[in-house]
Image: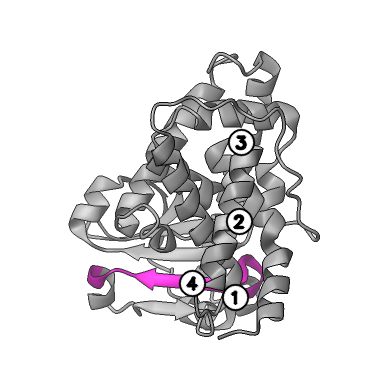
Amino acid sequence: MADADWLAAEFESHRAHLRGVAYRVLGSVSDADDAVQETWLRLSRTDVAGVLNLRAWLTTVAGRVALNMLQARGSRREEMSDSPPEARAEGGGPEDEVLLGDSVGVALQVVLDTLEPRERVAFVLHDLFAVPFEDIAPVVDGSGAAARQLASRARRRLRAAAGEPGAGGTASAAGTAALAAALAERAERQRSAVAAFFAAAREAEFAALLEILDPDVVMRADAAAARMGADELVSGADVVARWMSGRARDAVFATVAGEPGVAWVVGGRVRVAFSFTITADGRIAAIDLIGDREALAALPVELST
């Protein structure tokens, strides 16, 4: 077991981040604090000696705790907090993107409050805190593909609401417009990250790949993609960059489940889709290689022209 003092200190260093996660799921500062306390209790009862990324582990635990609380809440409407918790961590990070300011924050929270609990958790963890879908899967009691679909449905609702000033009843027109602008900025950041990755991978520019990849990036391939030659699991920027360098010459830009991506096309058919998880600072935190036919059909994948 890890030393208790060290564990407590590590938890405190992530407390603000965890409050941000829990608040976005629950919409209540007091409930978020309860979720963070429960996360600490679970950590204190768990041997995490083999956990390589404690922040990621804590994020998924906090997400699971918040989902349980949200489901227990049921149809009972909770009064939303007037303002988000002070969750901006030193040095910046995904939590700085999620707490976008009063007008955006309220508009976002209004829309999140209309989502089904698992949609809400999948969207918050992936789109706001850059948690890979495979890590979200056990939180929402499903597969990585199921988590991706949940986030995609949430994203469509969010974009629809952002296109309707005043949508949701309590968000102002200015707040909704600010949310629409923030979503557009996020989309552009994703497109830029994928474009930079695509260009560097295609031209075998190793240094450029390292620039766009998060140091702890994880690349996963499903069984179908693995049969075509992909490694099932590759982690770390150096290793992922070496694996990808020069391997995108036959790939094309695509939209994968509504998000910027890349596809490998043979004979006019998509054989493998590349789905990306992008951090708030525009780096790639995860790459999913999807080759399963049913999964590809369900995404869907649209090739760029």
**Residue 195 placement (x, y as % from top left):** 55, 56
| Alpha carbon distance from label 1 to label 4 | 19 Å
| Alpha carbon distance from label 4 to label 3 | 32 Å
Residue 279 badge: none
- The answer to which of marks 2 and 3 sits earlier in the sequence is 3
**Vertical side of 50 occupied by 253: above or below:** above
| Alpha carbon distance from label 1 to label 3 | 46 Å
The front one of 279 and 272 is 279
The front one of 137 and 195 is 137
| Pair 2/3: label in front | 2
* Region in magenta: 210-224
Asked where in the image residue 44 lies, by quadrant, the reply is bottom right
Lateral position of residue 221 relative to residue 98, left or right: left
Mark 4 belongs to which amino acid?
Answer: Val
- Kindly indicate whether the residue at mark 4 contacts the one at mark 2 (C-beta within 8 angstroms): no
Residue 218 badge: 4
Answer whether residue 21 is magenta in the image: no
**Residue 301 placement (x, y as % from top left):** 32, 47
| Alpha carbon distance from label 2 to label 1 | 45 Å
Residue of label 1: 205
| Pair 2/4: label in front | 2
- Kindly indicate whether the residue at mark 3 contacts the one at mark 2 (C-beta within 8 angstroms): no
- The answer to which of marks 2 and 4 sits earlier in the sequence is 2
Residue 28 badge: 3
| Pair 2/1: label in front | 2
Lateral position of residue 108 relative to residue 64, left or right: right
